[in-house]
């Protein structure tokens, strides 16, 4: 069951910021900017955090990690050191290596969210290269000091070609947001604008965010970020799912069992079968009820529901005019709405378009503690997500139809 962030984890996060800030004084209070790219082959998102080397973004990742390199500076923390406690606040699921007791020198256990593999790793001191920003342009280059895990090269398996590791964005002490906040003395907040193509943007610290043509992103819908015991993911208080404003009939507590989590390493929103099947049926019925000429075509993996594009209404600047999908949030008065631009995926050179939600595959031994819903990258694209880690709040806003997350001006001001 999801709940507010435990006091222990809040303490660890504050400890991380204070410990690292004392170790590495910094004077810059401007927000810190990273470009975000989408890899066409894997649909994963990357940021260039070290010497231009791309790291895969993992919203649930509690660490920064990359393969060991000759210029890495070993970080010799003892098992009882506060940084070691931060490095081991979350253990990867099913990682046998992580069950070993610590002996003298601290080890971390980086995790590949795509392959599901983990490894024992030493901690290192490193520097990340980024730019500060005023929300409109890059301002100046800065060096962000950080503690990372030095992983064996085999842990890169199934990551995008050229990827040099994983940049965890979780609310944990050694993830990127906490380390940027500590090193650069910015707020424990970050904004993420995932692109459908070209480059999106991530800003650490305060806003604002402007997208060309000089559009300030505002009017955020605000909700609570929940946590789940043993997980570093960001969970949302979703109480129901609706199609065309009509709630989908789900089994009692279907969403509460496992919860609803954000996942940048899932290309499309994945739902457990007991949630996916009613949603898919409700969408197909609502669509054909509104547009009875709509024609189904053969499924295109990984999707099940695909339609002849010639029989769909639209397209428009907000995508196909299909029934909206709503995640009904706590209290029932706030929704996260996905229009056709976020719910339909064009395939076969636009000859067909598919319902962009997929049925979750079971882990070994069944679904166990799997989330009910993992909100995938495609559905988050061209939305601005604003994470406030101190207040444990998430703000989200759909980017206006006349711009996109790819329209940040990366030309240096002045």
Image (tube, rainbow, N blue to C red):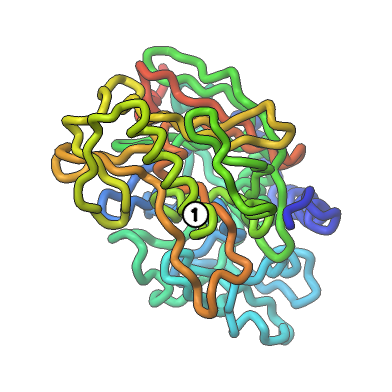
Residue at (40% x, 53% y) in the render: 358
Report the side of 19 relative to 119 (left or right). Answer: right
| Count of number-bearing discs | 1
Residue 195 point in image, percent of width and height: 37, 36
Q: Residue furthest top?
A: 214
- Front residue of 195/175: it is 195
Q: Is residue 108 above or below residue 167?
A: below
Query: Looking at the rendering, in which quadrant would you find the C terminus?
Result: top left
Q: Quadrant of residue 104?
A: bottom right
Q: Is residue 124 above or below residue 13?
A: below
Report the side of 182 relative to 283 (left or right). Answer: right
Report the side of 162 relative to 24 (left or right). Answer: left
Residue at (51% x, 16% y) in the render: 216
- Front residue of 365/213: it is 365
Residue 412 point in image, percent of width and height: 39, 25
The residue labelled by disc 1 is: 271
Residue 388 point in image, percent of width and height: 68, 37
Callout 1: few (<14), some (14-19), or many (20+) C-alpha neighbours within 10 Å?
Answer: many
Numbered disc 1: secondary structure: strand
Q: Is residue 22 above or below residue 288?
A: below
Residue 47 shows in this picture:
no
Residue 285 shows in this picture:
yes
Q: Residue furthest right?
A: 7
- Front residue of 262/47: it is 262
Q: Quadrant of residue 78?
A: bottom right
Query: Looking at the rendering, in which quadrant would you find the N terminus?
Result: bottom right
Residue 126 point in image, percent of width and height: 54, 59
Q: Is residue 92 above or below residue 172?
A: below
Residue at (65% x, 28% y) in the render: 334
Residue at (35% x, 23% y) in the render: 318
């Amino acid at each position: 069951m999801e709940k507010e962030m435990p006091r222990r984890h809040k303490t660890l996060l504050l400890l991380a910021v204070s410990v690292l800030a004392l170790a590495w004084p910094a004077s810059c209070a401007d927000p810190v900017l990273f470009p975000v790219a989408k890899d066409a082959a894997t649909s994963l998102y990357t940021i260039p955090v070290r010497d231009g080397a791309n790291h895969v973004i993992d919203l649930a990742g509690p660490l920064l990690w990359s393969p060991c390199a000759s210029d890495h500076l070993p970080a010799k923390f003892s098992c009882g050191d506060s940084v070691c406690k931060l490095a081991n606040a979350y253990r990867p699921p099913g990682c046998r290596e992580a069950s070993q007791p610590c002996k003298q020198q601290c080890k971390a256990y980086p995790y590949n969210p795509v392959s599901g593999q983990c490894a024992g790793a030493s901690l290192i001191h490193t520097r990340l290269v980024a730019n500060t920003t005023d929300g409109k342009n890059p301002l100046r280059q800065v060096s962000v000091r950080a503690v990372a895990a030095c992983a064996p090269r085999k842990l890169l398996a199934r990551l995008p070609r050229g990827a040099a590791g994983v940049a965890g964005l979780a609310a944990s002490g050694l993830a990127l947001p906490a380390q940027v906040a500590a090193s650069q003395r910015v707020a424990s907040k970050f904004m993420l604008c995932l692109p459908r193509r070209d480059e999106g943007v991530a800003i650490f610290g305060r806003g604002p965010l402007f997208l060309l043509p000089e559009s300030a992103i505002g009017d955020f819908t605000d909700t609570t970020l929940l946590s789940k015991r043993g997980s570093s993911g960001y969970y949302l208080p979703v109480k129901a799912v609706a199609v065309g404003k009509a709630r989908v009939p789900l089994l009692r507590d279907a969403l509460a069992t496992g919860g609803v989590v954000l996942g940048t390493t899932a290309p499309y929103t994945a739902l457990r079968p007991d949630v996916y099947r009613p949603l898919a049926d409700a969408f197909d019925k609502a669509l054909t009820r509104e547009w009875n000429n709509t024609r189904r075509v053969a499924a295109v993996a990984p999707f099940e529901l695909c339609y002849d594009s010639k029989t769909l209404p639209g397209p428009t600047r907000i995508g196909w005019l299909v029934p909206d999908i709503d995640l009904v949030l706590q209290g029932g008065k706030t929704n996260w709405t996905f229009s056709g631009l976020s719910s339909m995926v064009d395939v076969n050179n636009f000859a067909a378009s598919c319902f962009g939600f997929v049925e979750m595959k079971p882990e070994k031994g069944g679904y166990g503690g799997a989330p009910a819903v993992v909100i995938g990258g495609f559905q988050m694209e061209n939305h601005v997500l604003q994470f406030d880690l101190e207040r444990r709040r998430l703000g989200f806003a759909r980017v206006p139809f006349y711009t996109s997350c790819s329209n940040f001006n990366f030309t240096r001001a002045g």
